[in-house]
Each structure stands twice: as C-alpha cells, then as structure tokens.
Image (cartoon, helix red, strand yellow):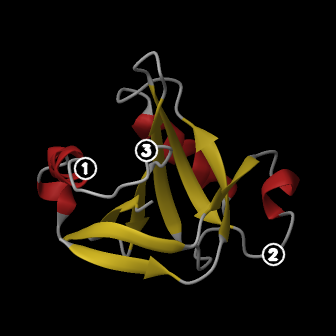
C-alpha cells in the first residue's frame, strides 16, 4: 500500500447502480453507451456506504468539458483532491473479487476519512488503482 495524491478536484459524471454489487455491470454498460466510441475518457468507480449499511455504487467518467454530465442527463460527483491510501491492482478481470478484497484492506488502514468513499481509477481495461481518502 502506498499514499497517492490527487492534485486537483476532478468532476465526473456517473450512472448509479440499481443495487450493489448486482447492478454494477449494468451501470457500466449504461455509462459506456453514453460516451463516444473511441473517445479518450478516464473511468472511475465510486462506492460509498450509508449508516443503514447499504452501498451506493457509481460508474463514472471524467467530464471532457464543463457541463458534459448534465448534457448527457447524468449527475456529477466531485472527486476531492488530496492524499489517499492506495493499492494498484493489475489484471483485475482474472478475479473481480480482488477489488473488494483490496478495499477491505484499505478501509482498515489508519487515518482514513470516515466520511470518505472507495475510489477506483481504471488506468486501462486491465489495471485499476483502488483508493480511499485520508482525513
């Protein structure tokens, strides 16, 4: 595990999964249907727990211009800048459960933001960086 710094706030637009974890695949399919084929989008996954124990998952893409999310009929989320505890996961498609296992480890690290979220940054189709903000 390492500390990873996000230099500036990032606005993403997203499709929220109807359920967690069952609805994640459908959310990604819907998001991919909204973005131009071959366009250079950076993709993020965002999950947050609530006091009642439910997890909300958002499949997201970085806006390529201000207002793109609302133009596509999506809500936006602001990824905050600052330090995160992080783990790089290569070839995650071989075992998709590795992402959840990685977040379980990250969430037990000291100094995480109790109001934070779990953030996936897809570096490419096979590799993902898992992050949790530090307080």
Task: Residue 103: give its label.
Answer: 1
Question: SS at mark 1?
Answer: helix
* Circle 2 Cα neighbour tier, 10 Å, few/some/many (<14 / 14–19 / ≥20): few
Answer with the quarter of the image where residue 49 lies: top left
Answer with the quarter of the image where residue 61 lies: bottom right
Instruction: Give the labeled residue for mark 3.
Output: 114
The Cα atoms of the two marked residues, 3 and 1, are separated by: 14 Å
Instruction: In the rendered view, tell whether residue 15 sits above or below residue 76.
Output: above
Verify CB contact (< 8 Å) between mark 3 and mark 2: no
- Residue at (25, 56) in percent of width and height: 110
The Cα atoms of the two marked residues, 3 and 2, are separated by: 31 Å
Task: Residue 65: give its label.
Answer: 2
Instruction: In the rendered view, tell whether residue 118 sits above or below residue 65.
Output: above
> Would you say residue 126 is visible in this rendering?
no
Image depth: mark 2 or mark 1 in front: 1
Query: Residue placed farthest to the top in the image?
Result: 52
Residue 120, percent from left and from top:
39, 59
Q: Earlier in the sequence, mark 3 or mark 1?
A: 1
Count up the numbered dots. Answer: 3
Residue 11, percent from left and from top:
69, 65
Residue 54, percent from left and from top:
43, 21
- Residue at (45, 59) in percent of width and height: 135
Verify CB contact (< 8 Å) between mark 3 and mark 1: no
The Cα atoms of the two marked residues, 2 and 1, are separated by: 30 Å
> Would you say residue 18 is visible in this rendering?
yes
122 relative position to 2: left or right: right
Residue 125, percent from left and from top:
34, 69
């Amino acid at each position: 595990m390492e500390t990873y710094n996000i230099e500036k706030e990032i606005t993403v637009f997203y499709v929220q999964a109807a359920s967690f974890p069952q609805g994640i695949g459908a959310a990604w399919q819907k998001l991919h249907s909204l973005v131009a084929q071959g366009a250079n989008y950076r993709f993020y996954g965002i999950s947050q727990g609530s006091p009642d124990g439910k997890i909300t998952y958002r499949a997201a893409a970085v806006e390529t211009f201000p207002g793109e999310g609302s133009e596509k009929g999506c809500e936006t989320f602001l990824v905050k800048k600052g330090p995160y505890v992080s783990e790089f996961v290569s070839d995650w498609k071989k075992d998709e459960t590795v992402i959840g296992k990685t977040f379980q480890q990250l969430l037990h690290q000291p100094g995480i933001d109790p109001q934070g979220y779990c953030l996936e940054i897809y570096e490419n189709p096979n590799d993902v960086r898992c992050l949790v903000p530090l307080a």
